[in-house]
Image: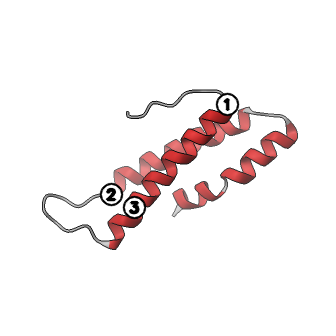
Amino acid sequence: SALLGALQEFPRTVAFAAEVREPHRIARYLEELAGLYHRWYDNCRVIPLGDDPIEPVHQTRLWLNDATGQVLRNGLTLLGVGAPERM
């Protein structure tokens, strides 16, 4: 998925931003990642409805959800910006 691909770009983005001394590249990356996350979240059910069982696909989606949150927090921390625990 596009979201997974974007998550994989985080280390390279940070390294390049540090190399060229342009922290705005991290901010731009985080903005794009947030947009990809919102599109992904709008198009798939992360957790099952009601009493439906949690299946492997839901576990994978929960992992993507958590991984995205962690990358966003890490990026904001690098920029010296606090991240809310909950939105």
- Among the 4 quarters of the image, the one containing residue 76: top right
Residue at image x 36%, y 65%? Answer: 59
Quadrant of the rendering where the C terminus is positioned:
top left
Image spot of residue 29 (x, y percent): 64, 42
Residue at image x 34%, y 72%? Answer: 56
| Residue 5 as seen in the image, left or right of residue 50 | right
The amino acid type found where label 3 is placed reads: Arg
- Estimate the spatial distance between the alpha carbons at disc 3 and disc 2, rounded to whole Å: 5 Å
Q: Which one is earlier in the sequence, the residue at label 3 or at label 2?
A: 2
Query: What secondary structure is marked by label 2?
Result: loop
The correct choice, above or below, for 11 with respect to 74 in the image is below
**Residue under pointer 2:** 46
Q: Residue 40: give its label.
A: none
Q: Which one is earlier in the sequence, the residue at label 2 or at label 1?
A: 2
**Residue under pointer 3:** 61
Q: Residues within 10 Å of mark 1 (few under 14, many from 20)?
A: few
Q: Residues within 10 Å of mark 3 (few under 14, many from 20)?
A: some
Image spot of residue 48 (x, y percent): 23, 61
